[in-house]
Amino acid sequence: MAATNAGVAEPARKPLFSESYKQSVLWLLVLAYTFNFIDRTIISTIGQAIKVDLKLTDTQLGLLGGLAFALLYTALGIPIARVAERGSRVNIITIAIVIWSGFTALCGMAHSFVQLMLFRVGVGVGEAGLSPPAHSLISDYFEPRKRASALSIYSFGIPLGSMIGAVAGGWIAQNLSWRMAFMLVGLPGVIVAILIKVFVKEPPRGYSDRLIAQQAADAPMTEGDETAPAVHTKPPSVWEVAKRIFGRWGFFHMVAGVTLASFAGYGVGQYSAPYFIRNFGLDLATVGIIFGLIGGLSSGAGTLLGGFLTDFAARKSGRWYALVPAIGLLIACPLYILVYVQTDWKLAAGLLLLPGIFHYTYLGPTFGVIQNAVSLRMRATATALLFFVLNLIALGLGPPFCGWCIDMLAQSNFRAVGMGPFFDMCPGGVGREGAGPMVDAACKAATAKGTQQGIIFNLLIYAWAGVHYLLAAITLPKDMAAAQAQTEAEALAGA
């Protein structure tokens, strides 16, 4: 209850957004991110069918899954974020979903590597418009102590999208074609765009921070304080944002950790389904179920666990924002290697339940730290800068690097049995037409072994990422406290 000048109590004002509405908005954004990752990662499940049909190398397949997508995805992220600091984030997200959904459907019409690469570039153009404004929206709806949890829920779209894309894409490619898989998963995204445009409201800038800052300063609450939009000042420059998130030891090593973990994740993820096809002879539908249901459940659990566990543990020390990801990645690394040395595919598939729970704990804490490190009109830009580094290196180079490792190791294995030039004799990883069954068997064996060796080599990068998170823990509490104090001061000033 609030008191008037006459001393008469009046009903307490309702908050601008109810908790149920904020949760509804969050889950709509999760739905958008789910389709984002369905369209982004489906190529990893159906890649073997594309490789054989279009006679591609694993390096080319890696380019389609990585650099082709990341090329304009990274380049456009920052300009779109700068628009999001001033304009409607809801409108940006709506337009972005329509663009990437249309280009995903067009991928099913490609008849060459170049055509498919161009369409994948188009998918990247659209998807560049989701996460920077989405992170900014979530940070305005949820206060700092809840952001790691909220952003881990948003990041749940990653394993959920990968899971649905794997199961649906594998089944459609197996029973119809890889072309229909692209078309049927791409077009429904338009419905999601309409839902977001109709139901999601644009919150005032700094809505949650202003409430927390006023409470911390014990400032009097006057009518409209908690809902008043921030003063429309010019957003800080990209350089100022970059100094805030890369200029402190703890934040820098958090970014290094998430980049390396994603580099390995995107690279290995591109070839995990082909590994099971090449080494165990499984079909597309079966590997879709393995990586959709088994891998998706564990990685989804890890994503949510990372955010909620970190928000709980961080009440005692901010170091846990870095320690939870560090411990998770250092445990996940040997568990993943254990999966890829099994000779029984059922045992390997079962073991996949374990590493994802530890692996994906890094997402929520990392995104939460970055959002808490910056002020109101830096948030979309901070996410775009993080994603620029993350996706240029991880998404852009991770799959091609892993594919190149596999190609080189497969070539070495083929030469070891004295069969001649690998790429000439084994287009698409199978024996060239007329070469005979012996050559075909040697091609497949060399490719299968090279895939296993290349994946295991790339899995070691998870341990490297874990070390960076350990380094971040050294100064993270001090870095976060300084950044939060600056953010609260700017929120009170209406910056």
Image (cartoon, rainbow, N blue to C red):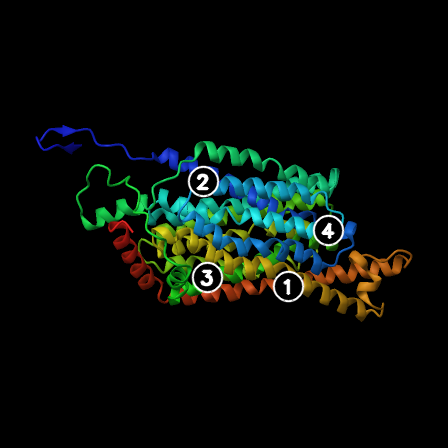
In primary-sequence order, the first of circles 1 and 2 is 2
The one of 316 and 238 positioned closer to us in this rendering: 238
Tag nearer the camera, 2 or 4: 2
Residue 316 placed where, x, y %?
A: 31, 56
Which secondary structure lies at badge 1? helix
Q: CA distance from mark 3 to mark 4?
A: 32 Å
In primary-sequence order, the first of circles 4 and 1 is 4
Q: CA distance from mark 1 to mark 2?
A: 36 Å
Which amino acid does the dot numbered 1 rest on?
Phe
In primary-sequence order, the first of circles 2 and 3 is 2
Which secondary structure lies at badge 3? helix
Tag nearer the camera, 1 or 2: 2
420 to the left or right of 132: right
Q: Name which residue lies at 55% across and 47% down.
A: 127
Q: Which residue is mark 3?
A: 255
Q: Which residue is mark 4?
A: 48
In primary-sequence order, the first of circles 2 and 4 is 4
Q: Which residue is mark 1?
A: 401
133 to the left or right of 45: left
Other-residue count near label 3 (Cα within 10 Å), few / some / many at <14 / 14–19 / ≥20: many
Residue 115 placed where, x, y %?
A: 71, 50
Q: Which residue is mark 2?
A: 90
Kindly check if marks 2 and 3 are in contact, taking CB atoms under 8 A apart as contact.
no
Which amino acid does the dot numbered 2 rest on?
Val
Which amino acid does the dot numbered 4 rest on?
Gln
